Amino acid sequence: MRTLQDDGSYERISRGFREYTGEDKAPAFIILAVLAVVLVGVILYSLARRDRGGGRQLFRRLSDANGLTGPERRLLQAVARRAGEDHLPALFFRRALFDEATADMAADRDLLGSVRRKVYDA
């Protein structure tokens, strides 16, 4: 009867595992590093987009609450760009910012007056 120790095939397999040097780790490490960089990029991008989307959503809600029409919303967005305001909803709470940005703005005065009345009760 033969035992496992007499059979050389198991010894060859065992020796193959013991002699493994791990030289193939470099490509796996590079792939892992690239995946980590991509994952961090996706997370940062999603965080940045989430903040922008939240501001836009709040702008829409405030516009609806104040009864602004489409042209009035576009005018308010143009005023925000002109004022250098990144956070659109800030115009609903900062009348001085609105007044400064529209002081010499070439826009329909009736439309400006309508926005001022609806948003600032003026």
Image: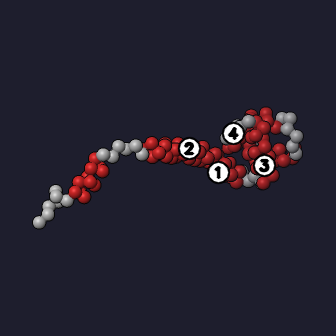
Crowd band around label 2 with a 10 angstrom C-alpha radius: few (<14), some (14–19), many (20+): few
Q: Is residue 1 left or right of residue 92?
A: left
Disc 1 secondary structure class: helix
The residue where tag 4 is placed is: 86
Q: Which mark is residue 1?
A: none
What amino acid does circle 3 point to? Answer: Arg
Picture quarter with the C terminus: top right
Where residue 1 appears, as percent x and y from the top left, is: 11, 66
How far is disc 1 from disc 3 in space, using C-alphas? 15 Å
How far is disc 3 from disc 4 in space, using C-alphas? 15 Å
What amino acid does circle 1 point to? Answer: Gln
The residue where tag 3 is placed is: 74
Question: Between 93 and 70, which is closer to the camera in this rendering?
Answer: 70
The residue where tag 2 is placed is: 41
Where residue 20 appears, as percent x and y from the top left, is: 33, 46
Q: Are marks 3 and 4 in contact (CB under 8 Å)?
A: no
Q: Is residue 58 visible?
A: no
Disc 4 secondary structure class: loop
Taking the spot 68% from the left edge, 52% from the top edge, the residue there is: 60
Taking the spot 67% from the left edge, 41% from the top edge, the residue there is: 87
Q: Is residue 34 visible?
A: yes
Foreground tag (3 vs 2): 2
* Residue furthest to the left: 1
How far is disc 4 from disc 1 in space, using C-alphas? 14 Å
> Considering only order in the chain, which callout, 3 or 1, is on the residue closer to the N terminus?
1
Taking the spot 56% from the left edge, 43% from the top edge, the residue there is: 41
> Considering only order in the chain, which callout, 1 or 4, is on the residue closer to the N terminus?
1
Disc 2 secondary structure class: helix
The residue where tag 1 is placed is: 57
How far is disc 3 from disc 2 in space, using C-alphas? 32 Å
